[in-house]
Amino acid sequence: MKTSAMVVLSGGQDSTTCLLWARATFDEVHAITFDYGQRHRAELDAARRVAAICGVKSHEIVEAPGLLLSRSPLTSPQVPLETYTDFKTMSATIGGRVELTFVPLRNPFFLLLAANHALYRDCYVLVTGVCEADNANYPDCTSAFIVAMEHAMNEALGLHADGKRRTIHIATPLIRSSKADTVRMALGYPEGRLALAYSHTCYAGQVPPCGRCHACVLRAEGFREAGEPDPLISRFGL
């Protein structure tokens, strides 16, 4: 039987790595991207480019502007984006609090919509790039959340009732990976270097990236630890 998966593809480093993993793991891969009015809209173009590089079966961009309200600088342009000079300073600043870019219930919302679109294609595997080691303390990027979300979706579909029908599975290949692990993983695939070169991580939405936001600093630290040049940075000759 042909296997298939639906990847939640933001266009960032983690979701790009997940797409590469899915292409190597499943016979057929679909990708879904959400336009929710995010500040870093350059990631939508990145998602299109990455999906094309990886040769997915289908890629759709779901428009959902204005549906997610928050005080996060990602959805409220008037809120200043916190920046950092380096990884050590960023870690000390954030500490145990949730990073200010957190958009409440964004991941549950995306996963529910992704599941709906996946089931339409008779696809029962969702792939998401959530990670517990991202120095952001996001509560919807944990193993506990994924287990609960998977259970809730199957309950809502009645798929736990008889134990005979296929159930939805949420795959999280990066859940316990460091950014350096993610870099090594992505570069291990044939299209990895090219796909990362066209991914977009910068929360400020700048191209080339600003290098100072949480996502930029975390990405840079991952490539530094992995001992690899970032193909995105190299593409701009920086």
Image (tube, grey):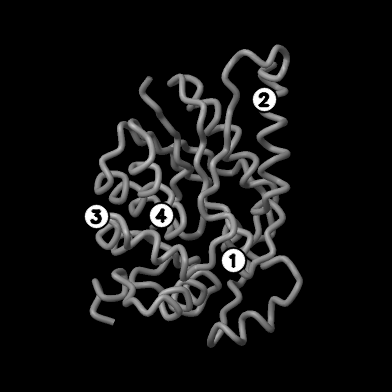
Q: In terms of sequence position, does the residue under pointer 2 or pointer 1 come before the other?
A: 1
Q: Position of residue 141 (x, y in %)?
A: 64, 53
Cα–Cα span, label 3 and label 4: 12 Å
Cα–Cα span, label 2 and label 4: 26 Å
Q: Residues within 10 Å of mark 4 (few under 14, many from 20)?
A: many
Q: What residue is pinned by disc 3?
A: 190
In this picture, residue 25 sits left or right of residue 129: left
Number of the label disc, if any, that sits on residue 154: 2
From what the image shows, is residue 171 above or below residue 201? Answer: above
Q: In terms of sequence position, does the residue under pointer 1 or pointer 3 come before the other?
A: 1
Q: Could you tell me the amino acid type at mark 2?
A: Asn
In this picture, residue 161 sits left or right of residue 167: right
For image coordinates 40% across by 69% down, the residue present is 206
Q: Could you tell me the amino acid type at mark 3?
A: Pro
Cα–Cα span, label 3 and label 2: 35 Å
From what the image shows, is residue 147 above or below residue 225? Answer: above
Q: What residue is pinned by disc 1?
A: 134
Q: In terms of sequence position, does the residue under pointer 2 or pointer 4 come before the other?
A: 4
